Each structure stands twice: as C-alpha cells, then as structure tokens.
Image (cartoon, rainbow, N blue to C red):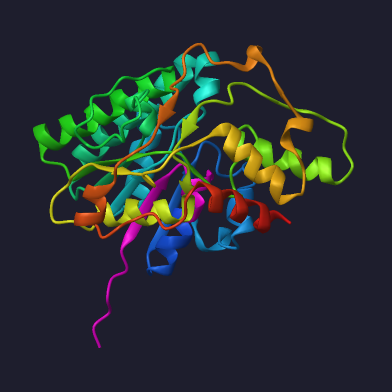
Amino acid sequence: MTNIKKPIALICGISGQDGCYLAQFLLSKGYIVFGTSRDAQGSSFTNLVKLGIKNQVHLLSMAPEDFRSVLVALKKSNPDEVYNLAGQSSVALSFELPAETIQSITIGTLNILEACRMLERRPRIYHSCSGECFGDTLGKPANEFTPFHPMSPYAVAQTSAYWLMNNYRDAYGLFACTGILFNHESPLRPERFVTQKIIQAAKNIIRGSNDQLILGRLNISRDWGWAPEYVKAMWLMLQQDAAQDFVISTGTAISLEDFVRAVFEHFGLDWRDHVIQDERLFRPADASISFGNSKKAEKLLGWKAQIKAGEVARKMIISQL
C-alpha cells in the first residue's frame, strides 16, 4: 500500500486569532502544521490551548524581520504552503509604534518572500493583507480593482507588503497571493480590539461593575465577519491553479454604535447608560466607512461569508458565557 505524503504548512504568527483557527482548519484537512512565534519556548500559546490543538502543532521561534530566523524556520519545516499572518496587527497601536509596525509587516513579508525564492523547493505563499489599505471606501464596497488609500502606518505597511507579493510573483514566478481581509472577529481576539473591549465591558457591567465603557468614534462603519470562516478562504487561495489576490469580506457594514447597541441589548442593557465617547481616543486619521465586495472570491473560490456583524457579536458573546 502506497503511503500518501501529508501536506506541510508553515503558519507565521500562529499564536494570534487567525493563526490558531487556520491551524485548527489545516489539521482537520490532514496537514502537518508548523507554527512560528518570536519565542516558541517562552510563549504560552493560550489560543492554541483554548482550541485544544497546541500539542498537535510543531512550534518554531521566528522573528519576521530577522532574515536568518525566517530562513531557518523554512528549512526546518520544509513546507508546501506558507501562511504569513505575522506582524503588528493593531491599527491604533501602529500610530504609537509606526517603525515596529512597518518592520514586522513589510520587512517581514520581504524576508519570507526572499527566503522562499532561495529554496530549492519553493512553497506556495499566502499573505494576509487588510481592507484598511483601501482607507475610506466612500460608501462603495471595495473590490480587487479599488485603489489603495492607506490612512494609518498599519495600512501603509500592509500596502507595501501587498506590492511586494505582486512583485515577487511577477519577477520570480513565485506562487504568491494576498487575501485583502476586512475586519473579522472571534472570541480569540485580544481585548485591545474594540469588539472584544465592548463585549468584556458589557459582561462586567451585568456582573455588577460600575465602570463606564470609554470609546472613540462611534459613527465609523466597518465590515465585520467571523474569523473561522475567513481562514478557509486563505486555504482556498493556495489551492488554485494560479496565484491571484482576493478581497474577503461580508459585503455589509454597520456602525460601531450599532455594534455596541447589539452587544448591550443582548445583556438587557441600554448602551447609552454605560458608554462615554472620548475624543482622546480618536485616531489621527480614520476611515468613516469601510466594506468590501467579495464577488470574485464567491465566483472563483466558492467562498461566501455566512455570518455577518450582528451574528458575529452574538456568537462572540455566547462562546464566552
């Protein structure tokens, strides 16, 4: 009987929300999964533990902006597929740490591409980009032909990484594709992300806390999807005959105020009694409305978001109670 070789995947940045769900998904597909973190020996990998898969993943230390560590991780894992999810991922924090953000995302992507180019057996490469690259979509859903207008250091870094992926695909023939993902949430989100911050505040209030929830702009609108669905789209991109870039989104946007209202109503609370808007939390630049058009993904990948913003909030709440 012939042994069928299991495919090998390397997930750069496995400890985050997307990395953990992607690892879970790939394991269910029969992959051997390697994952990187800056300090694999010292990290707790809480999210992998929550999903019950930490012991099924081979963990490696890697700093994306350190070329040698990238090359070592690739040689140790010898992957068929590389998923680049690493780098500083907070838009708000990127205004405070612009250099770190650009180094970890842009230089990190360059190092991964250059290292893959040098390998004798070149893997397929996926990079997770962001709908933030489009900036304000001015009430129209962004697709693959919409021009970029980045409005934060994070978006600038991701825009640069996007063009690096395109350049290496065209110049060196690498199978390099980018998913331009709009906001996608889950219970694994850290509390610095606004959706998780809102849910945790409402939970604390219903348990007797008198704390107020302090937020910045409430009139911004975003395209919020469900993270476990989005990682399937990442995998589907690397299964195509040719590398292409795809916008991944729900196609709808709701305001932050509406998201807050939905969360607080779930707990039987009136959000207006508990929320304070503080201009000190306003970002130096911020898109008023941002949402995507994923018709290309639906047509070519057979992928379509099933869970949208209101349901995202409900699922995040239920999973944590």
Quadrant in which the C terminus is drawn: bottom right
Whole-percent x, y for residue 310 in the image:
55, 49
The number of numbered discs placed on residues in the rendered structure image is 0
Q: Is residue 18 magenta?
A: yes
Apparent side of residue 245 relative to residue 129 in the rendered image (left or right): left
* On screen, residue 128 above or below 213: below
Q: Can the viewer see residue 123?
A: no
Apparent side of residue 174 relative to residue 148 in the rendered image (left or right): left
Query: What residue lies at 29% left-to-right and 42% top-to-bottom?
Result: 293
Q: Is residue 79 magenta?
A: no
Apparent side of residue 183 relative to residue 271 in the rendered image (left or right): left
Query: What residue lies at 63% left-to-right and 45% top-to-bottom?
Result: 262
Quadrant in which the N terminus is drawn: bottom left
Write down the region rendered in magenta: 1-21
Q: Can the viewer see residue 126?
A: yes
Whole-percent x, y for residue 227 in the image:
47, 50
Residue lying farthest bottom?
Answer: 1
- Residue nearer the viewer, 51 or 40: 51
